[in-house]
Every structure is written in C-alpha cells, then in structure tokens.
Image (cartoon, rainbow, N blue to C red):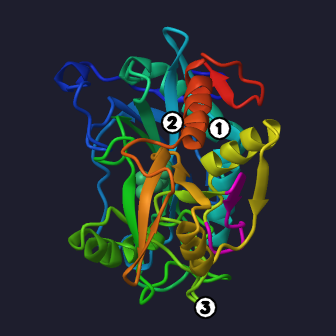
Amino acid sequence: MSKLNIEVKKVTDSRIAEVDFENLSFGEEFSDHQFEIRYDNGAWQTPRILPYDAVPMYPAISTIHYGQAVFEGMKAFRYRGDKANIFRVDMHYDRFVRSCKRVCIPEIPREYFIEGLKTLIDLERDWIPEAKYKSLYIRPIVFAADQTLGLRSSKTYRLHIICSPVGNYYAEGIKPIRLTTMPEYVRAVKGGVGDAKVPGNYAASLEPTIKAQQQGYTQVLWLDAIERKYVEEVGSMNIFFLIGDTLVTPPINGSILPGVTRNSVLEIAKAEGMKVEERPVSIDELIEASRNGDLKEIFGSGTAAVISPVGSINHEGQHITVSTTSDEMGPVARRFYDQITGIHHGEIPDEYSWCTVI
Ligand code: COI
C-alpha cells in the first residue's frame, strides 16, 4: 500500500525475460503491471495496481460507440544508473485533464494520477530500457464505461495506465523522414477537438496517412481546415522550421495539439537566446524559403517521436527541401535532441524542473 492507499497486486512471474530489448518496435510489448482506477457512483474509487491483463467489456459500452475517451503519451527514462525519471509529469497531467474536460470526463485528482504513476513506474523500473534512445513509454487512457446506446455523457469511467518499452518511433530511426500535405483532408478545426488528445483525431488520420505511405511518404503534414494554406502539425508530432536563423513553429490556436516536447524545445531555444517565432506558417512561405535557400532545417517534436528530422515536404508536386540536405539530423535539431535526451537521463542538469526522479 502507498500513502494514497493504492492496492497493489503483483504478478507471480514476470514476462520481462521474454522481451527482446535490443529490437523493440514502438508499442508492441507491455510491462507486467497496469494502474487502474474506476469512476463509479460519482467518484473516483480506490486506485489499484494489477497485473497487465485484458479488460473485459460488453459490446454496448458507450466508448466504442461514441468515442468518449482520452489518452496521454509520456515516458520514463533510466536516470543516472538505476533511478527512473518520469519526464514532465505535471504538464502531461494538465493536458490530460484539459482533454477530459473537452469530452465531459470527470477530472481525476492530480495526486491520484501522479502518485499512481510513480508507484507503477517504481514497480516497473526494470522494464526501462538502458540505451539512450530507448525508454518506457507510458500510456494513460480513460474511457466511458456505461452500457448504453443513448448519446450522453457516461456516468462511469475506467482509467488505465499501461507501460511499453520502446525504441525509436519511426522506422527511419533519427534519419530524416519525408512528409506530404494532403489538402483534400483536414485533421481538425478550431472549436473541434484537435487540441485534445482524443482517439478519434487519430482514427481520422489513418486513411490519408495510408495514402501518403502508398506514395512513399512517412506521414501527412496537416494544413489548416479553412484556407488549407497554413501548416498545423504532423499528427504524431508538432513541427518546427529553421528559416534563416529563426526557429518558427505554428501557434497553439485551438486545432493543434499543445505538445509537451514542443514546449520543451521552445523553452530551451528561448533560454539559449535563439530567435523564436510562434506564428502562422504558410506552405507558400516554405516553398519560397526552400527555393532561396533560407529553409535550413525542419524537424518534428513529440513524446514518441522526441526530435525527428524532416528531409522534405511534398505539396501538390512542389518539393520543399532543407538547404542542409543530408542523410542526418541538422545541427540545430541535433542540439535540441542532445539537450532533451541529456535531461531525460540526468546527463545534463534539470534546470527547468522537468524530471520526477524515483
Ligand atoms: C505521443 O507522442 O505520445 C503520441 O501519443 C503520438 C502517438 C501517435 C504515438
């Protein structure tokens, strides 16, 4: 039992020996335990840590009909030997409850979420891979649990936190990926749910992403839903451009996910005295900057993606390329990558108080 009265039921036999930590795909292996808390009778009940197992459900459970659900993506890292570091817990919790509010899911108290998570990661610390580019990905998910076909906000919910040891998100590793716009599709509109981490946003991205992949691109670069002219995000990450000596990224405007890694990049850039602009970036500006050699680097940021370089963007047959075209991450993206992963693992002092070390 922890000080929060978390019930803990441990596995009798760990599955860890069955996992090939050298060859981890993203999100295919799951650790021994999960955190679970139920919302019943108008209140969050006793939190529990249980063996990772199936969640039985009836076909009438409302979440699979109407999508009243929210998830998060966080990571724990090996920190100075055998300690564990959960990165930017508070910011992830804040985004989680904001997303929940948008789809009428009751707020889980901060201490339940954070203490539950710390207890879980403490128990699963052997599952945190050692290599610098690997981590234990943490996936909180909360979903409506009423059985009803009526379209209404559920009265009951289930919240689970599961963990998955991961390597790089993209098959390319940290080599530059290729993006394409898909102006016939949009990801989100202001006033919708594009700034909340709800599963439907990701389901809606699948068809255009498959089309992009069939054309040889890794992901879709989303344009705004009204003019189909301004860059928004990539779906699995936010996007940054180095234009001249200025770091430019689209502003958080209601249809873009407020990325935690995006925020980390901006904080580091500002602390280093870089010129930073959060402003609308049109695809025409990028085409022009690419033509005249001003577009030095493009990279994405995300919890899963960390910092991932982008080599080129296709927009209706026009090719946007970075001037430092090579097969490697550009020097500015590399600096952010090294800083952020250095803080993750405790090799660089945590001047921003981003680490929860246990
Ligand atoms: C994350 O970066 O944590 C996400 O949730 C993105 C997802 C597509 C893996």
The residue carrying mark 3 is: 227
Distance, label 2 to label 1, CA atoms, is: 9 Å
Distance, label 2 to label 3, CA atoms, is: 36 Å
Dominant secondary structure (helix, strand or loop) of the stretch shown in magenta: loop
Mark 3 secondary-structure assignment: loop
The residue carrying mark 1 is: 89
Mark 2 secondary-structure assignment: strand
Q: In the image, residue 139 lies at what x, y percent?
A: 46, 45
Q: Which of the two labelled residues, at mark 2 and mark 3, occupies the earlier sequence position?
A: 2
- Give the crowd class for mark 2: few <14, some 14-19, many >=20 residues within 10 Å: many
Amino acid type, residue under disc 1 in the picture: Val
180 above or below 113?
below
What numbered label is drawn on residue 75? 2
Q: Which of the two labelled residues, at mark 2 and mark 1, occupies the earlier sequence position?
A: 2
Amino acid type, residue under disc 2 in the picture: Lys
- Give the crowd class for mark 3: few <14, some 14-19, many >=20 residues within 10 Å: few
